[in-house]
Amino acid sequence: MRKTSLGSPKTELHVRRADIDPTDFIPLLATDFGGIYQVYLAASDERLKMLRFAMSLLAAPFAAVVALASAKVLDPAALTSWHRIPPYVFALTAIFGAMGVLPYLRLIEATSRHLRTARAVNNFRLLYVEELRDHFSQVGWAPNLPVDPAYPEAFAPTSSSGLTAIGLAVVDAAYISIGLLGLSGARPTAIVVTIWIAVTATLLFLIYHVRLGAARRRQGPANPYGFPSVES
């Protein structure tokens, strides 16, 4: 039997790669960037929608109380004292507070996608900055957008998205805690209510912390090529 000599698969792969012109990858890069940018825009839009949805749910108990008071079903004077507030008012508060957790979770997921795709866009931007940095230096131009693929950070509680998540967590926790304490028939002090809200808000915030990554100090984008800072 005659043995047939075959070339190494690795060698053949290198030969095929050598036949490919670098410009052949530009359409692929453009397609990838277009897809990533569409996800980025969709995530940004979903964040706004979830925030509006959450605010609508949190406003619902107030609208219901106003409607009941206008229909003279509820005496407005009863709202001035904890023990005179009807149980159904506490129930509405707890229910809509619990419902507000859903857009809160969706907001976290949208924020995660938004930050991840923002880092991907920065990585694409870094590609052409690396290739054209000499030309940029000659014409005296510097990018005014981040070129660091590690920016923005996954977990940044002091950013606008982080503060939004913290604010929703506190308000949802207040609704749930006040509603459940009222339904329990207890007459808690302000300290007890505050503790309940703090514990519930901490649990909700832990979801944000775990989902977006370990806590770390927020940093600005790296500037590996020494461009002057033009961030506004």
Image: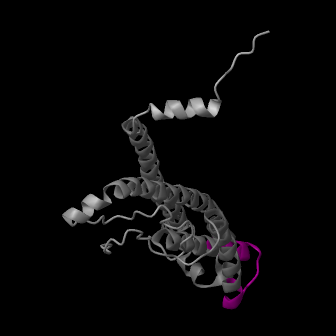
Is 169 or 209 nearer to us in this picture? 209
- In the rendered image, residue 142, in percent from the top left (x then y), is placed at 28, 66
Q: Let me know if residue 182 is in the magenta part.
A: yes
Is 136 or 153 nearer to us in this picture? 136
- In the rendered image, residue 33, in percent from the top left (x then y), is placed at 42, 46
Which residue is situated farthest in the left direction here? 139
> Which residue is rendered at x = 31% and y = 74% of the image?
228
| Stretch of the chain drawn in magenta | 175-193
- Residue 225 vertical position relative to residue 112 in the rendered view, above or below: below
Tell me the colour scheme of the image. Answer: one colour
Relative to 8, 146 lies left or right:
left
Is 217 or 225 nearer to us in this picture? 225
Q: Quadrant of the C terminus?
A: bottom left
- In the rendered image, residue 184, in percent from the top left (x then y), is placed at 77, 75
Relative to 158, 78 lies left or right:
right
**Residue 115 in view (yes/no):** yes
- Residue 72 vertical position relative to residue 24 in the rendered view, above or below: below
- In the rendered image, residue 58, in percent from the top left (x then y), is placed at 54, 66
Which residue is situated farthest in the front direction here? 2
> Which residue is rendered at x = 73% and y = 85% of the image?
187
Q: Quadrant of the N terminus?
A: top right
> Which residue is rendered at x = 54% and y = 35% of the image?
14
Our reading of the magenta stretch's main secondary structure is helix
**Residue 49 in view (yes/no):** no
- Residue 230 vertical position relative to residue 15 in the rendered view, above or below: below
Which residue is situated farthest in the right direction here? 1
Is 4 or 131 nearer to us in this picture? 4
Q: How many marks?
A: 0
Q: Quadrant of residue 215?
A: bottom right
Relative to 19, 109 lies left or right:
right
